[in-house]
Image (cartoon, rainbow, N blue to C red):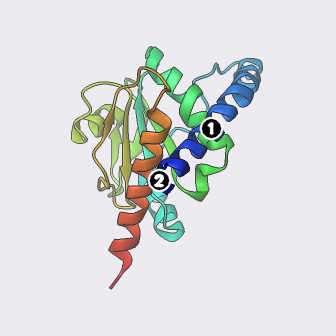
């Protein structure tokens, strides 16, 4: 087994154990709060401010576009993104946030303009949910968007690799 395969296997095992043990606890805590299992990630309301934070921290933003009635969005958050947050990946490796579509609330885009979440989704060409973007502090895509979710089989390893590539691209862009 190569070093990369060994590394990925170890990460997968850790994430699987976190999902196994932290998933039920996370769901119970959210249910007691009356929020349900899909409310692990904070909703983004000011992308311009998030951009400043990630530029200082040197990490990408992982932005999940979701909708209230999306079962796969809930599962992605509970099975993959929630355990990442509990493991400390947010804010150490990536800043995790979500944009809820079809809501009346406006948000501030990366240029400081107030827009709807649906307008941001149109700009980013979100065709279905869940869709994940790894962005720099100016809202530019660092890796191709990740569309859809069916199961946690290989998704965490694939997402982990995308985060590593995004982080490397951020480091490369800082080199004079």
Asked where in the image residue 169 lies, by quadrant, the reply is bottom left
State the residue in front, 57 or 46. Answer: 57
Asked where in the image residue 40 lies, by quadrant, the reply is top right
The residue positioned farthest toward the front in the image shown:
1
Q: Which mark is residue 98?
A: none
Q: Is residue 168 left or right of residue 32?
A: left
Q: CA distance from mark 2 to mark 1?
A: 16 Å
Where does residue 46 sit, x and y in percent of width and height?
46, 50
Q: Residue at x 45, y 46 (%)?
A: 62
Q: Residue at x 69, y 26 (%)?
A: 20
Q: Residues within 10 Å of mark 2 (few under 14, many from 20)?
A: few
Q: Which residue is mark 1?
A: 13
Q: Residues within 10 Å of mark 1 (few under 14, many from 20)?
A: few
Where does residue 135 sit, x and y in percent of width and height?
37, 53
Where does residue 52 sit, x and y in percent of width and height?
47, 65
Q: Relative to 8, is 147 above or below?
A: above
State the residue in front, 134 or 112. Answer: 134
Label 2: state its secondary structure: loop
Q: Which residue is mark 2?
A: 2
Q: Residue at x 49, y 67 (%)?
A: 58
The residue positioned farthest toward the bottom in the image shown:
176
Label 1: state its secondary structure: helix
Q: Residue at x 31, y 51 (%)?
A: 143
N-term-proximal mark, 2 vs 1: 2
Judge depth for marks 2 and 1 and give the one in front.
2
In which quadrant is the C terminus drawn? bottom left
Q: Relative to 58, is 71 above or below?
A: above
Where does residue 138 sit, x and y in percent of width and height?
34, 61
């Amino acid at each position: 087994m190569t070093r990369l395969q060994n590394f990925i296997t170890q990460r997968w095992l850790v994430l699987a154990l976190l999902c196994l043990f932290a998933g039920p606890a996370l769901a119970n805590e959210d249910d007691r709060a009356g929020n349900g299992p899909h409310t692990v990630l904070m909703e983004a309301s000011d992308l311009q401010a998030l951009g400043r934070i990630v530029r200082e921290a040197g990490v990408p933003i992982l932005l999940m576009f979701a909708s209230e009635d999306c079962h796969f969005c809930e599962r992605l958050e509970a099975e993959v993104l929630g355990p990442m947050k509990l493991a400390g990946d947010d804010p150490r490796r990536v800043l995790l946030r979500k944009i809820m579509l079809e809501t009346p609330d406006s948000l501030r885009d990366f240029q400081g303009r107030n827009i709807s979440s649906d307008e941001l989704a149109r700009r980013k060409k979100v065709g279905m949910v869940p869709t994940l973007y790894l962005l720099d502090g100016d809202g530019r895509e660092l890796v191709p968007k990740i569309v859809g979710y069916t199961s946690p089989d290989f998704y965490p390893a694939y997402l982990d690799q995308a985060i590593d590539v995004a982080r490397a691209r951020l480091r490369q862009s800082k080199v004079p």
